[in-house]
């Protein structure tokens, strides 16, 4: 289920590469949906906003007031467009899992890793721009106020955290949640179908129908819960991105 057969797998790709499979068209759908949504929000924008324009402004204001300003202050306003687009794109990638028979794009670790990689590169670009590369590196790996001898223990841990742990956890948090949610939905869906046996004796048929009905109710309830989780995970990924950017834009004290 989570590793669909590739539709096109050219010979020049590495052996462990899946080529073009189900995830790619879902990614394209999510990207087009994100672009289309913001074109729709901004179409025929006026000084007095329409209801459609107000929805877009409400979302932008939510990202600004809940993510960028609490983490970066007024400096964060210039990052609001990027953070808003990131949030809506991740949410669209998550919502593909609600299409019948489809999977969330982020249930494949390659896509959260790609997003985390973009954030990691952007973080260091901003660090070079605002603080200077060596100054930022020194502040991250050799934090001020630490006794010199403790650097022998602290600096390797900080180096490992900055270059390995932060990008890895940024990836795994989104991937693991989407993967687990899809797995639970699959268990309820396939379990209900497996338990339904209309060809058995009347008593067993009624029992199997009741159990299948319970599985269906659980499946429906968990879809609503999973929808909430999809929004929360998009928010958390964007919030962590803003926190990383804040460390690059302004030196920690």
Image (tube, helix red, strand yellow):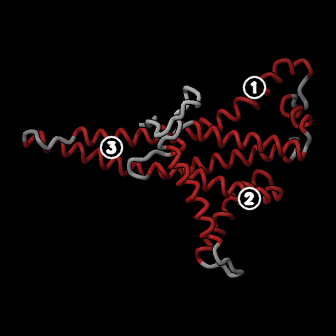
Residue situated furthest front in the rendering: 11
Viewer-side residue, 148 vs 251: 251
Q: Report, in whole angstroms, how far the alpha carbon at label 2 lies from the one at label 3.
A: 39 Å
Q: Dot 2, crowdedness within 10 Å: few (<14), some or many (≥20)?
A: many
Q: Which of marks 2 and 1 is nearer the N terminus?
A: 2
Q: Which of marks 1 and 3 is nearer the N terminus?
A: 1
Instruction: Give the SS element for disc 3.
Output: helix
Q: Report, in whole angstroms, how far the alpha carbon at label 2 lies from the one at label 1.
A: 29 Å
Q: Which residue is drawn at 66% across and 69% down?
A: 57
Count the marks: how many? 3
Using the rendered image of the protein, determine whether residue 229 is visible from the camera's viewpoint: no
- Mark 1 highlights which residue? 160
Height in image: 153 above or below 182?
above
Quadrant placement of the C terminus: top right
Q: Which of marks 2 and 3 is nearer the N terminus?
A: 2
Q: Is residue 153 left or right of residue 58?
A: right
Q: In this view, does 23 lie to the left or right of 125?
A: left
Using the rendered image of the protein, determine whether residue 28 is visible from the camera's viewpoint: yes
Question: Percent position (x, y) of residue 205?
Answer: 13, 42
- Mark 3 highlights which residue? 189
Q: Dot 1, crowdedness within 10 Å: few (<14), some or many (≥20)?
A: few
Q: Image quarter for residue 159?
A: top right
Q: Which mark is residue 80?
A: 2
Quadrant placement of the N terminus: top left
Instruction: Give the SS element for disc 2.
Output: helix
Instruction: Give the SS element for disc 1.
Output: helix
Question: Percent position (x, y) of residue 224?
Answer: 43, 53
Q: Which residue is drawn at 22% across and 39% down?
A: 195
Question: Percent position (x, y) of residue 231?
Answer: 55, 52
């Amino acid at each position: 289920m989570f590793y669909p057969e590739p539709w096109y797998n050219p010979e020049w790709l590495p052996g462990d590469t899946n080529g073009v499979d189900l995830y790619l068209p879902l990614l394209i759908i999510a990207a087009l949906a994100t672009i289309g949504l913001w074109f729709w929000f901004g179409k025929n924008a006026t000084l007095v906003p329409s209801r459609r324009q107000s929805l877009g402004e409400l979302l932008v204001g939510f990202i600004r007031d809940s993510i960028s300003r609490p983490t970066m202050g007024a400096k964060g306003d210039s990052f609001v467009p990027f953070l808003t687009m990131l949030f809506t794109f991740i949410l669209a990638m998550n919502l593909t899992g609600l299409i019948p028979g489809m999977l969330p794009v982020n249930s494949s670790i390659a896509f959260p890793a790609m997003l985390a990689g973009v954030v990691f590169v952007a973080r260091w670009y901003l660090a070079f721009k605002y603080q200077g590369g060596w100054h930022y590196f020194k502040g991250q790996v050799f934090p001020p106020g630490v006794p010199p001898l403790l650097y022998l223990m602290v600096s390797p841990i900080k180096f490992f955290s900055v270059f390995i742990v932060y990008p890895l956890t940024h990836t795994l948090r989104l991937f693991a949640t989407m993967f687990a949610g899809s797995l639970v939905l699959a268990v309820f869906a396939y379990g209900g179908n497996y338990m339904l046996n209309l060809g058995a004796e009347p008593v067993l048929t009624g029992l199997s129908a009741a159990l299948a009905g319970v599985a269906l109710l659980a499946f429906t309830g968990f879809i609503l819960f999973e929808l909430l989780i999809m929004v929360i995970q998009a928010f958390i990924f964007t919030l962590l991105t803003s926190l990383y950017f804040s460390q690059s834009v302004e030196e920690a004290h």
